[in-house]
Amino acid sequence: MENIYLCKIPIFDKNQNLVAYEIKYDYENEDFKQTVKKLYSLISDIDIVSILSGKEAFIKVTSDILIFTEFLNLIPKEIFTITIDYTNLKSKNVQEKVKEYRNDGYRFAIDLDTLENIDIDFLISFSGLFNFVFIDVSGISDEKINLIHNLRQLPFTMIANNVDSLYDFNKAKDLGFELFEGEFFKEPEKLESDTDVFNKLDTFKIIRYVHEEDNLNEIAEAIKANPEISVALLKYVNSSFFYLRSPITSVNRTVIYLGKKNLINWLMLISMMSVSNKDTDREVVKAALFRGKFMELLSKEINNDINIAETAFLFGILSFAERIFKAPLSIILRHLNLSEELEKDIKEGRGYFGELLSLAIAVEKNDKNKIKEYVNKLNIPKDRIADITIQSYEWVESFTKLV
């Protein structure tokens, strides 16, 4: 596959309900027609409705893609809203294409970036063609606030991006923004030092027991003491993830089949899901799952050691543990009884697993330069990144439906 990198970013409303995603992509091929061909191939080869959790999505196109290709005709207009940079709107050809596609039922958004050199009168003349505007809300000046007040009078839904703090979120709400995306939604709301949450979670009790007990039958007995976890475990092992010839109906056989490390990873995921009550929480769990699966598949690409790959998965999901459990990482790790070396690597984000994590984060942010840096450092074929990304997104959606 061509070296094309993509990611999806959740968009929330002011009540932090999930509304849509933005699909971001970058590429290394200078031929935009080849890029469109590969991008369409990528979108058409996956279950896009599943990847997007049934939500709609925004996707940005360049003026060349809009004018000289049939890309828009190839993607479902019921799902995608097309985003165009404000600077491209100055082109008469772009204006005509937007009008043409608008008449065919497509929806459009304008990316106003940081509101530099925006002509409000020019925007007014196109206000009937666009449904949304994206605005970067980081470092908004008083002059830009006045411009935002003027934009509120137009029939656009305003989307705030680069919402990276509670201050950004509250300020954007006060300014009349209705939709929001940014790193703020991945940050811990408040870290609690109280460990009571872990004592209440049956899964954490079992995780501790699995670490301490080597007898797999004894582990199975501990799991069977919790019917809800037993049923969920049997459902998981008999899912399409494992391609079993005949179903496993025994918890004891399931524990033997999975092994301790796989079992601990699964119990961690169940723990995360159990404390996720809001859309923002659930999206962070999905982000943790993505990191874990992406790192696991990357590790398998580098070497075929299953134990290392399973540790990479755990390393990835734990990178969001503070945000999910709202507790300091040191307390969370204390309940997992990991090796001292691995615990230190997780805290510091270092070593082999730290490099895998850095690549996963670069993919999440669609940072092409960082992706190239770590792909070269880890000696991974560039054309595998898009495949691994899609496989990871698909696995996340399948797993979250299962539990």
Image (cartoon, rainbow, N blue to C red):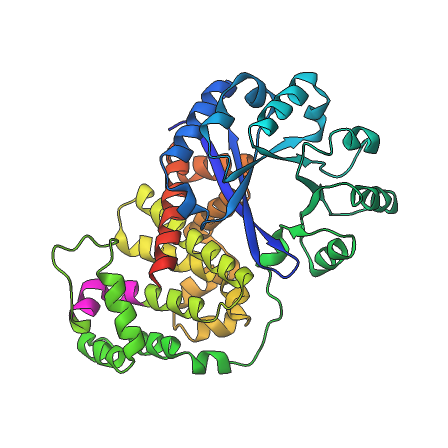
Give yes or no for residue 190 being in the magenta stretch: no
* Relative side of 6 to 136, left or right: left
How many numbered marks have been drawn onto this rendered protein structure? Answer: 0
Provide residue 308's location: percent of width, then percent of height.
Answer: 32, 54
- Residue 271 visible in the shown view: yes
> Residue at position x 23%, y 63% from top?
258
Q: Quadrant of residue 166?
A: bottom right
Frontmost residue, 244 versus 350: 244
In which quadrant is the N terminus drawn? top left
Frontmost residue, 124 versus 68: 124
Provide residue 251's location: percent of width, then percent of height.
Answer: 19, 72
Q: Is residue 108 above or below residue 207?
A: above
Provide residue 11's location: percent of width, then percent of height.
Answer: 59, 50
Give yes or no for residue 261 being in the magenta stretch: yes
> Residue at position x 44%, y 65% from top?
343
- Residue 319 visible in the shown view: no
Q: Which residues are magenta?
A: 253-263
Q: Main secondary structure of the magenta part?
A: helix
Q: Is residue 314 above or below residue 352?
A: below
> Residue at position x 42%, y 35% from top?
43
In which quadrant is the C terminus drawn? bottom left
> Residue at position x 52%, y 63% from top?
281
* Relative side of 165 to 49, left or right: right
* Relative side of 160 to 391, left or right: right
Residue at the limit of the structure toward the left, as seen here: 246
Q: Is residue 228 above or below residue 113?
A: below
Provide residue 349's location: percent of width, then percent of height.
Answer: 50, 56
